[in-house]
C-alpha cells in the first residue's frame, strides 16, 4: 500500500504519537508511508522512521488555501492508495484536497479517518462538529479507538461508510519495567522521598487534560494526612495555571513538573500510580505506562479494561492502603503480568498494526470495485 497520513501537527500528543508509531510499523512491513502535517510544530518529528516523505504545510490560519494547495499537489504527486486523516481538522483538509485534485474513477484513493476523542469542549468546537459531520459521512472508513466511543458518536450521527473499532496498541517490550535502582535514582532526582506516594500523570499540560483536578486531589489527600505528591510528566501552556492552583492550595512543594522528556519511562517508573483526568479521552495511550506503575486512576469509569478509581472521592482510603513501600514492588510485578495478559491478543502493538492494515487493504479493494467502469 502507498499511504498518506495527515495530522494537524506533530506536537507532543497521543494521537500524533500513535500516528507516527503506526506509520513506522507499517513501513517496516513494506508499505510506502508518506506524512503531511498542517501546522508547523515538529516536536515529534525525530520519532518518525522509514517514511518515504514528510511535508509540513505551514498553515497560518484555520483554513489556509496555500496549505490546501500544497496538500493537493502532494496527493497528485504521491497518488496514495489510501489517505488517513487523524481527527476532524485534518479530515477537513483531506476532503478538500481530494476534491481539489479532482481524482475520480478507479484511481480514487479511499479516505480513512482515525478519531481519538469522545467529547468536544466549548461551544466553538461543538459548532464545528456540525459541519465536520458531513465530512465523516463522506469518508470510506472511520476508526474509533474503543467501543464506548463508537457508541457515543454513532448516537450523535458521526459515522462513515464503514465504522471500525481499533484499540490503541501497547509495545510490550518498550514498556517492560526497569530495575528498582533506576526508579530510586529518578525519585531522588525529582525530590520524592521513599515515604511519598507519587501520583503521576503523563500528558501535555493542556486544558483538556485537566491537571488542575489532580492538583485539587493532592491538596485533599494532604489534608487527610496522606503523603501524596503529584509528578506531572510533560509541559505545555497550562503550566502557569497549574503552578498557580498549587500555590493557592498550599501544595506547590508537592506538585512536581518535569518538563518535556524524550523518554518518559524512567519518570513513569518512579510513580506509584498513574492518573488519567482528561475530559476528552476516548482510549488513553497510558496502557503501557500502567505496566510501569502500580495502578491506574481516573476521574470517571472508562472502557479501557484497566483498573480505575475515581479521584478524589475514593482515593483517600485507596491510597492509604497502598502507600506502604513494602507493597509497591509486588504490585508493580502484578500489574506487568496483568498488562501482558490484557494486551497480548487485542491491544498489543502488533495486533494494532495488523488491525489497521487489514481494513485499509480491504477498503482499497472495495473502492476500486465501486469505481470500476
Image (spheres, grey):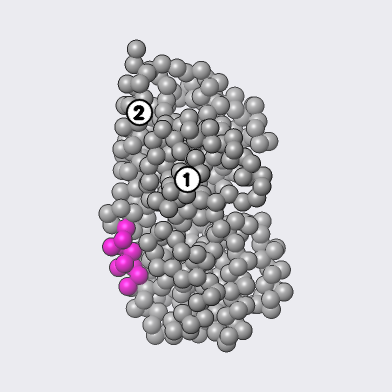
Query: Considering the image in quadrants, where does the N terminus appear?
Result: top left
Residue 73: tell me if it is visible.
no
In this rendering, position of residue 322 left or right of residue 90: left
Task: Identify which residue is drawn at 49% across, 21% down.
Answer: 76
Q: What distance separates the C-alpha of mark 2 from that of mark 1?
A: 27 Å
In the image, residue 297 sits, relative to residue 124, either above or below, namely below
Label 1 element class = loop
**Residue 248: x and y, percent?**
72, 74
Residue 92: tell me if it is visible.
yes
Q: Residues within 10 Å of mark 2 (few under 14, many from 20)?
A: many
Task: Say which of 260 and 369 sits in front.
Answer: 369
Task: Say which of 188 and 60 sits in front.
Answer: 60
Task: Identify which residue is drawn at 51% across, 51% down.
Answer: 118
Q: Residues within 10 Å of mark 1 (few under 14, many from 20)?
A: few
Q: Main secondary structure of the magenta part?
A: helix
Task: Identify which residue is drawn at 37% across, 42% down.
Answer: 164
**Residue 145: x and y, percent?**
42, 49
**Residue 49: x and y, percent?**
43, 42
The question of residue 337 being in magenta is answered with yes
Which label was assigned to residue 155? Answer: 1
Which label was assigned to residue 364? Answer: 2
Which label was assigned to residue 118? Answer: none
Residue furthest to the top: 373
**Residue 369: x and y, percent?**
32, 21
In the image, residue 284 sits, relative to residue 370, either above or below, namely below
Q: Which residues are magenta?
A: 334-343
Label 2 element class = helix
Q: Quadrant of residue 216?
A: bottom right
Q: Nearer the viewer, mark 2 or mark 1?
A: 1
> Are the residues flagged by discs 2 and 1 in contact, CB closer than 8 Å?
no
In the image, residue 303 sits, relative to residue 183, either above or below, namely above
Residue furthest to the front: 155
Amino acid at each position: 500500500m502507498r499511504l498518506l497520513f495527515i495530522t494537524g501537527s506533530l506536537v507532543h500528543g497521543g494521537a500524533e504519537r500513535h500516528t507516527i508509531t503506526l506509520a513506522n510499523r507499517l513501513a517496516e512491513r513494506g508499505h510506502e508511508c508518506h506524512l503531511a502535517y498542517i501546522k508547523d510544530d515538529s516536536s515529534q518529528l525525530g520519532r518518525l522512521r522509514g517514511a518515504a516523505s514528510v511535508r509540513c504545510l505551514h498553515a497560518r490560519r484555520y483554513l489556509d488555501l496555500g496549505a490546501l494547495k500544497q496538500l493537493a499537489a502532494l496527493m497528485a504527486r504521491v497518488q496514495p492508495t489510501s489517505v488517513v486523516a487523524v481527527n476532524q481538522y485534518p479530515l477537513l483538509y483531506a476532503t478538500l484536497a481530494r476534491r481539489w485534485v479532482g481524482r475520480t474513477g478507479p484511481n480514487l484513493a479511499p479516505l480513512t479517518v482515525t478519531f481519538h476523542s469522545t467529547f468536544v469542549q466549548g461551544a466553538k468546537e461543538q459548532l464545528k462538529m456540525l459541519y465536520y459531520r458531513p465530512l465523516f459521512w463522506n469518508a470510506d472508513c472511520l476508526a474509533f479507538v474503543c467501543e464506548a466511543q463508537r457508541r457515543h458518536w454513532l448516537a450523535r450521527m458521526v459515522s462513515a461508510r464503514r465504522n471500525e473499532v481499533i484499540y490503541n496498541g501497547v509495545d510490550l517490550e518498550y514498556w517492560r519495567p526497569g530495575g528498582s535502582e533506576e526508579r530510586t535514582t529518578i525519585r531522588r532526582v525529582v525530590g520524592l522521598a521513599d515515604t511519598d506516594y507519587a501520583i503521576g500523570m503523563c500528558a501535555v499540560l493542556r486544558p483538556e487534560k485537566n491537571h488542575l483536578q489532580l492538583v485539587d486531589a493532592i491538596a485533599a489527600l494532604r489534608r487527610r494526612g496522606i503523603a501524596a505528591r503529584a509528578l506531572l510528566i510533560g509541559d505545555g501552556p497550562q503550566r502557569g495555571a497549574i503552578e498557580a492552583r498549587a500555590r493557592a492550595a498550599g501544595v506547590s512543594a508537592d506538585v512536581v513538573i518535569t518538563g518535556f522528556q524524550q523518554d518518559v519511562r524512567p519518570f513513569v517508573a518512579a510513580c506509584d500510580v498513574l492518573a488519567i483526568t482528561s475530559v476528552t479521552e476516548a482510549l488513553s495511550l497510558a496502557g503501557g505506562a500502567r505496566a510501569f506503575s502500580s495502578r491506574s486512576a481516573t476521574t470517571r469509569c472508562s472502557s479501557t479494561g484497566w483498573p480505575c478509581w475515581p479521584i478524589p472521592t475514593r482515593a483517600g482510603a485507596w491510597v492509604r492502603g497502598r502507600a506502604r513501600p513494602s507493597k509497591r514492588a509486588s504490585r508493580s510485578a502484578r500489574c506487568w503480568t496483568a498488562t501482558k495478559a490484557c494486551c497480548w491478543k487485542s491491544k498489543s502493538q502488533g495486533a494494532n498494526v495488523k488491525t489497521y492494515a487489514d481494513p485499509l487493504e480491504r477498503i482499497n479493494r472495495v473502492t476500486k470495485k465501486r469505481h470500476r467502469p
